[in-house]
Image: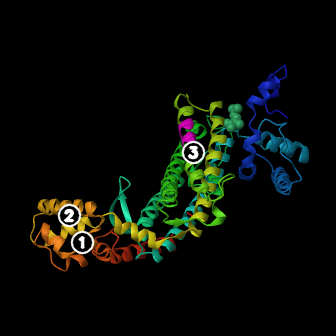
Amino acid sequence: MKLWGGRFTKETNQLVQAFNASVSFDQKFYKEDIEGSIAHVIMLAKQGIITEDDKEAIITGLKGILADIEAGRLEIDDEHEDIHSFVEAHLTERIGEAGKKLHTGRSRNDQVALDMKLYTRKEILEMDGLLKDLLNSLLKIIKGNTDTIMPGFTHLQKAQPVTLAHHMGAYFEMFKRDRSRLKDIFERMNYCPLGAGALAGTTYPLDRDFTAKQLGFKGPALNSMDAVSDRDYLIEFSSAMSIIMMHLSRFCEEITIWNSNEYQFIEIDDAYSTGSSIMPQKKNPDIAELVRGKTGRVYGTLVSLLTTMKGLSLAYNKDMQEDKELVFDAIDTTKGCILLFNGMLDTMTFNKDKMRKSAEGGFTNATDAADYLVNHGVPFRDAHGIIGELVLYCIGNNKTLGELSLDEYRNISPVFEEDIYNAISMETCIGKRNTTGAPGQQAMGEVIKIYEKYLDSNASKY
Ligand code: ARG
C-alpha cells in the first residue's frame, strides 16, 4: 500500500520503487514505530481529535501487530515502502476505518525522526552497559596487578617501568570518558520531534508536551523545522562510536604486539584465537585484528553522515534516509566489538615473568639511576650524561644496570654507593612513583577506590 497514491496517474517505475524504499532496513525499528504511534493516538483522543473508541481500536490493533511480528506470525515484507506504511496498512486491514485515523496530525517526517531517536536512545543505553561491563573486567585486572611490573613505552621503545594495573588504568580512563560522551549525547538529543508534522507543525490542537513525556523525553523539540531535519545526534553518536572504536583499536594493537613471539606478554584464550590452515604452530589474535579492522567502518559512518548533511537545505530531504543503514551498521559493529573484546580480555592470561624480564632488560631504570645521582648532589644535566655513559658501557658489555659491579659504577662516577642497587630495583622505581595518577602502589590504591565507587554508583540508566 502506498501512502501517497492520490495525486498520481501512473504506477511508479519498479526500479524507482526499489530505490526509494527503506523497509528492508527501517524495519529494525518496528517496535519504536508502534510505540510512537500508541503515544500519538492516546494524545489524539485526550485532545478530542479522535474518539475513545477509535483510540482503543487502534491501540489493540497496533499491539496485535507488535505481538505478531515478535512471535514471527507477521513477516515484514518488501511490498511496502517503509515500516510506517507497513504498520498502517496492516492496522487498517485489521481494524478498518479507525486505522486510517492513526496518521492524523502527523507526517512521516516527524514519525521517522521520532523512531530513529527512540531507537538510538535505547542503543546508547545498551552500549553504555557494555562499556560498563568492560570497565568491570578492566578493574578486576587492575586490582590483581598493582605489583605486576612491565615496561612502559614511548615511541614503542622501553621507557620506564610501570605496572600492568597502571597500563590497564589508562584504558579505564578512556572508556570512562566514552561513557560520559554517550551520556552527554543522550541528554542533548532527548527532545521529542513528534508533532512537528512535515515541517511546520499542524493545525490540530496537539499536546506535544504530553507525548514527549509519555515517551520519556525531556520535552518537545522547540522548532518544527529543526525537529524533522536534525541529525546532529546521529553525527555525535557516530563520533562517540568512532572514538570508542579508536580506543579499542589501540588496545588491540597492543594485544597483537604483546601476543607476538617476540614479546609473549600475554596468552589469548583458545576460545578467542584462531589457527592457520597451513601453519600448524600458529595461534593468531584474529579477534584483536578484526576489531582494529572494523574501526575504519565506523569512521566511514561518521564521514558519510557529515557529508550527507552538509548540503541540505531545510527542512526534511530524502537524503536523510541514508542515515539509517550507516548508523545501524556502526551500532551493531561497535556493540559487537566491545562484547567480543571484553570476552577476549577477560579470559586472557598475562605472562608476568616475561613482562618483568622485559622491564629489567631495557634500561627502564635509567631515569631512576640519574635521580639517584641528583639526590647525591649531582646536577641533573651531569647526571643524565653519566648514566648515558653507563648505559653505553652496559650495551658494550651486554649487562643491565643492575648487573654492574660497584667498581664498574665507580669507574664512571665516585658518587655511587652500595645503595644504588636498591635505588634502581624495579620495585623502587615503581614504589616511589606515588604522585596522583602514577603507577606506585599507594597512588594506584587511591585511584582504585575512586574506580570502585564510580562503577558502584554509575547505573547504566541516565
Ligand atoms: N523512509 C523515510 C526516511 O527514512 C521516511 C520519511 C519519508 N518522508 C518523506 N517525506 N518522503 O527518511
Q: Disc 1 marks which residue?
A: 404
Q: Amino acid at mark 3?
A: Val
Q: Position of residue 118 (x, y in %)?
A: 65, 51
Q: Is mark 2 within 8 Å of ligand 1?
A: no
Q: Disc 2 marks which residue?
A: 390
Work out whether residue 235 or residue 282 is closer to the camera in this orientation and state it.
282
Q: Earlier in the sequence, mark 2 or mark 3?
A: 3
Q: Based on the picture, tell me whether residue 333 belongs to the magenta stretch.
A: no
Name the side, left or right, on which 314 lies relative to 271: left
Count residues near mark 2 (Cα–Cα under 10 Å), then give few for <14, some for 14-19, many for 20+: many
Work out whether residue 90 or residue 12 is closer to the camera in this orientation and state it.
12
Q: Alpha carbon of mark 1 to alpha carbon of mark 2: how far?
A: 9 Å
Q: Disc 3 marks which residue?
A: 298
Residue contact between numbered discs 1 and 2, judged by CB atoms under 8 Å: yes
Q: Which residues are magenta?
A: 299-305
Q: Alpha carbon of mark 2 to alpha carbon of mark 3: how far?
A: 49 Å
Name the side, left or right, on which 399 lies relative to 219: left
Work out whether residue 415 or residue 452 is closer to the camera in this orientation and state it.
415
The residue under the point 89% across, 47% down is 95
Q: Alpha carbon of mark 3 to alpha carbon of mark 1: how far?
A: 52 Å
Q: Main secondary structure of the magenta part?
A: helix
